[in-house]
């Protein structure tokens, strides 16, 4: 399939009106939607922004390739936009972007589509081609340029392959090997591969690059090639199976390094500067991951929280539905008992919530130590649940299990190779579970259980002033980074309090989390002259996202104007959180937004709604005051 079968004249904008990153994304999404390629433009745009949060797709040299693979795409397509003046796109080289290719890949896209979309990124590495695109005067000329360059590139690729097959009889394996990969596997994977191949060709070196793309692993490295190569370059932001490189010189980097620093990476191999890689455990246990450097506490915690959320949301909403039949409707023998409500409460509370902390701990441990950490993490988390240590005990169990598993790997590293299989299926689980079990039972659970009780008593004994202050802080935290570490810290605290039986803090947290998208959406309706048409359209979806407690709905607005939007959102959220606590609201459901309002305890649900509406108005008015009119 040719690139021009996906890039059409009706998906091109030769003179973009947008002067910001968000504006460019909105304009190109609109073009794809108007051409009939999207089934859900809002969901597609959300997927595009999600990819941008991982790392900017402004790759430098004046190019940006925003891309997403999602069910919101009806037909795979490419949108092209051009800005002669240039737009700040948070590019890797800090320079404005002029050429924008938005790649829309559907979840069910076939291999031809995915390979074609990926091939476009490799063409853009050619500087002459980029200049030709900037100077083209019509859509037809651009299509012609793309066709010609694609034919030239493919032809060159075939010639290069034939040359490699007939070259040097003395050396039949590549001198350098490389592996590239990015989270989406559409653009950066192949651009890094091309950059490395081009630079190796300049230096007269033979290279083979394995790509971890959206269509699977391409050009896989063989054991013979690995054994004979001078070294291996890893340029990937996704997990790579690393055990095969044991004892070989390996340079581990991010995918953007492969695109921007290919000469330096190749020099590390040819000069002998790359360190020798020493694998630990099996192929499943030893993988390169997240080479952006996102290691440490936050990365491991987020791995646990993200895997726990389905249990929190699913179980919490089912529990909330059971309350519709009466607060005591799940209690057998009570006058309001309802069998269906009891079943919902059992599914959500007795089972989903019982597993919640174990899942959190298991995936924290797995993030630290891979597979060997998972079982002890799950066991430790479950012991925290049953032993009174609750959510906080589960956090401790996850980190303990992960680092214990890593220590166990080192302790057993010198065992004879013949025992490697037994080590994975017997030694690791037995020793790790035994150690974590003892630590939880005798060292962790008793003091943490006492601490939970003390914290619960402290909250119960708080005066009105302190309660309001706590609500103000928790509500404001939800809007500081809208889904980031501060937001997640407040949300995690709320879940811990629900687990401890105090529902008031989470009422403030949910109110604070709903306000940013709702308040900004209201501002787009009240102060239309201060928002672009695309922003006003996005405001409609923000109403829905805010109503269902999806704080991230405010991110596009905050990213475009953080100095004004974030303070306004934080102020409204803080007010909503303080009022929720002042009114005495308690929320036993951890998620759901308006769907769980009827489960509010200790206050009239209308008062809780009023707290959110007041916070929403505060944010909207502050946005209206602070934000400048659109020119």
Image (spheres, rainbow, N blue to C red):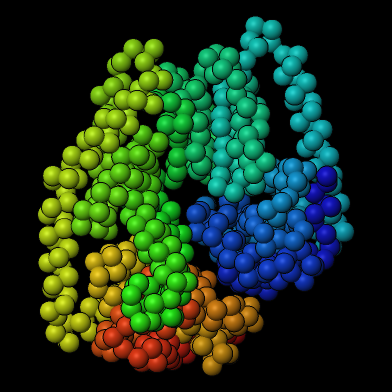
Depth check, front residue: 340 or 309: 340
In what quadrant of the picture does the N terminus appear? top right
Q: Is residue 231 left or right of residue 174?
A: left
Give the vertical position of 439 relative to 556 (above or below): above
Residue 601 in picture, x, y percent from top left: 32, 83
The image quarter containing residue 79 is: bottom right
Give the vertical position of 48 relative to 205 (above or below): below
Q: Is residue 79 left or right of residue 97?
A: right
Depth check, front residue: 422 or 399: 422
Depth check, front residue: 331 or 553: 331
Q: Is residue 84 left or right of residue 325?
A: right
Q: In the displayed image of the protein, which residue is found farthest to the top?
A: 170
Q: Is residue 319 left or right of residue 179?
A: left
Residue 460 in picture, x, y percent from top left: 16, 77
Identity of the residue drawn at 17% across and 75% down? 459
The image quarter containing residue 47 is: bottom right
Identity of the residue drawn at 13% across and 44% down? 442
**Residue 92 visible in the current orientation:** yes
Identity of the residue drawn at 58% across and 65% down? 46
Depth check, front residue: 139 or 165: 165
Numbered circles on residues, count = 0
In what quadrant of the picture does the C terminus appear? bottom right
Give the vertical position of 68 relative to 542 (above or below): above
Residue 302 in picture, x, y percent from top left: 38, 54
Give the vertical position of 330 relative to 142 (above or below): below
**Residue 274 visible in the current orientation:** no
Identity of the residue drawn at 17% across and 51% down? 445
Residue 212 in picture, x, y percent from top left: 60, 37
């Amino acid at each position: 399939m040719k690139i021009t079968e996906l890039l059409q004249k009706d998906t091109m904008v030769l003179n973009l009106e947008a002067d910001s990153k968000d504006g460019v994304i909105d304009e190109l999404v609109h073009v794809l939607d108007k051409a009939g390629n999207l089934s859900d433009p809002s969901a597609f745009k959300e997927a595009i922004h999600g990819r941008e949060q991982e790392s900017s797709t402004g790759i430098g040299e004046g190019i940006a390739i925003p891309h997403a693979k999602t069910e919101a795409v009806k037909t795979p397509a490419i949108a092209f936009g051009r800005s002669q003046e240039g737009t700040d796109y948070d590019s890797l080289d800090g320079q404005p972007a002029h050429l924008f290719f938005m790649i829309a890949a559907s979840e069910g896209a076939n291999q031809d589509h995915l390979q074609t979309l990926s091939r476009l990124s490799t063409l853009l590495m050619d500087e002459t081609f980029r200049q030709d695109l900037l100077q083209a005067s019509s859509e037809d000329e651009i299509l012609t340029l793309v066709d010609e360059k694609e034919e030239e590139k493919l032809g060159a690729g075939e010639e290069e392959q034939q040359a490699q097959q007939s070259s040097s009889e003395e050396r039949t394996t590549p001198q350098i090997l490389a592996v590239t990969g990015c989270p989406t596997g559409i653009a950066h994977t192949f651009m890094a591969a091309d950059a490395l191949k081009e630079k190796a060709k300049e230096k007269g070196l033979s290279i083979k690059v394995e790509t971890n793309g959206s269509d699977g692993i391409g050009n896989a490295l063989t054991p013979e090639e690995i054994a004979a190569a001078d070294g291996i370059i890893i340029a990937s932001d996704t997990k790579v199976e690393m055990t095969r490189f044991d004892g070989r010189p390996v340079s581990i980097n991010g995918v953007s390094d492969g695109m921007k620093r290919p000469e330096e990476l190749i020099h590390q191999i040819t000069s002998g500067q790359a360190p020798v890689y020493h694998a630990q455990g099996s192929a499943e246990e030893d993988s390169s991951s997240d080479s952006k450097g996102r290691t440490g506490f936050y990365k491991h915690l987020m791995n646990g929280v993200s895997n726990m959320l389905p249990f929190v949301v699913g179980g919490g909403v089912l529990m909330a539905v059971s309350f519709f039949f009466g607060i005591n409707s799940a209690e057998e023998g009570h006058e309001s008992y309802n069998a269906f409500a009891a079943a919902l409460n059992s599914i959500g509370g007795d089972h989903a919530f019982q597993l919640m902390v174990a899942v959190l701990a298991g995936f924290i441990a797995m993030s630290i130590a891979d597979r060997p950490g998972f079982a002890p993490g799950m066991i430790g988390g479950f012991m925290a649940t049953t032993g009174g240590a609750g959510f906080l005990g589960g956090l401790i169990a996850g980190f303990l299990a992960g680092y214990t598993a890593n220590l166990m790997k080192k302790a057993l590293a010198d065992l004879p190779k013949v025992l490697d299989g037994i080590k994975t299926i017997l030694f690791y689980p037995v020793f790790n579970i035994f150690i974590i079990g003892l630590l939880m039972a005798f060292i962790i659970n008793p003091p943490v259980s006492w601490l939970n009780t003390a914290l619960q008593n402290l909250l119960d004994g708080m005066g009105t002033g302190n309660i309001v202050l706590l609500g103000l802080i928790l509500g404001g935290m939800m809007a500081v980074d809208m889904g980031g570490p501060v937001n997640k810290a407040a949300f995690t605290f709320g879940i811990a309090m629900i687990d401890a039986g105090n529902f008031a803090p989470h009422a403030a947290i949910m109110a604070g989390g709903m306000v940013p998208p709702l308040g900004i959406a209201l501002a787009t309706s009240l102060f239309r002259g201060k928002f672009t048409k695309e922003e006003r359209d996005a405001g409609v979806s923000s109403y829905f996202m805010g109503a269902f407690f999806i704080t991230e709905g405010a991110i596009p607005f905050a990213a475009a104007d953080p100095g004004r939007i974030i303070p306004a959102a934080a102020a409204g959220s803080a007010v909503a959180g303080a009022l929720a606590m002042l009114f005495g609201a308690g929320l036993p459901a951890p998620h759901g937004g308006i769907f769980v309002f009827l489960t509010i305890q200790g206050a009239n649900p209308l008062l809780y709604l009023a707290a959110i509406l007041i916070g929403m108005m505060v944010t909207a008015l502050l946005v209206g005051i602070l934000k400048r009119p659109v020119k």
